[in-house]
Image: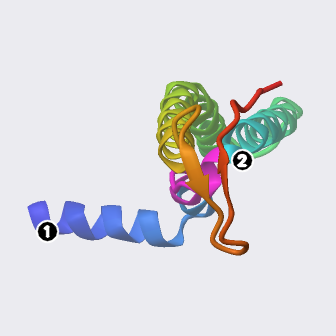
Amino acid sequence: MWNASVAIRRYLRTFMPSNIAIDQLRTQRGLSWVLPVALAAGLAYLVAAAAVSSVVERGGPGSLNVLILLFIWNAMKFVWMGVLSLPVMARVVARERRVEGYNDHEARPPQGALVIHPSTGTSSKSRPIIRS
């Protein structure tokens, strides 16, 4: 039983388009695309669910209700991914700013220190850097 559930999960993760897209959005490169893709895909799935629902209401086959549930489920997955990505993006931006701040501090000599320029061999006092 356990092996069957693992095999089904692996199949769904590998071959279902919405799962592939969500896995790509969870990567560091995909994180910047989460909100636009979540909004577009969520809206597209909800529009598709509404369209199929109107077909069923006009006398279409009742088996299309399964497709409606699938569209709504996929829309919820994308919207939920968009909501969960906000704290993750905030954490990544804070970490990048912290690292950038450390690198800026370490790369600059202390104010007033004697600096020897490697290209010219001359020395000068370091000046404070004004950030805008």
Question: Which corner quadrant of the image does residue 41 belong to?
Answer: top right
Q: Is residue 1 visible?
A: no
Q: Position of residue 93 (x, y in %)?
A: 57, 34
Which residue does the image show at 83% across and 24% down from the upper left? 132
Badge 2: few (under 14), some or many (20 or more) residues near its Cα, within 10 Å? some
- In reply to whether residue 94 is colored magenta, the answer given is no
Is most of the magenta stretch helix, strand or loop?
helix
Q: Nearer the viewer, residue 50 or 19?
A: 19
Amino acid type, callout 1: Asn
Which residue does the image show at 62% across and 63% down from the upper left? 17
Q: Position of residue 39 (x, y in %)?
A: 77, 34
Q: Nearer the viewer, residue 93 or 42?
A: 93
Amino acid type, callout 2: Trp
Q: Which residues are magenta?
A: 22-31
Badge 1: few (under 14), some or many (20 or more) residues near its Cα, within 10 Å? few
Residue ID for mark 2: 33
Q: Position of residue 84 (x, y in %)?
A: 51, 28
Which residue does the image show at 51% across and 57% down from the upper left? 23
- In reply to whether residue 23 is colored magenta, the answer given is yes
Q: Secondary structure at mark 2?
A: helix
Residue ID for mark 1: 3
Vertically, is 74 above or below 72? Answer: below
Q: Nearer the viewer, residue 103 or 93?
A: 103
Earlier sequence position, callout 1 versus callout 2: 1
The answer for how far apart the CA atoms under marks 1 and 2 are is: 34 Å
Query: In front of the other: label 1 or label 2?
Result: 2
Which residue does the image show at 84% across and 37% down from the upper left? 59
Q: Position of residue 38 (x, y in %)?
A: 70, 38
Q: Is residue 23 visible?
A: yes
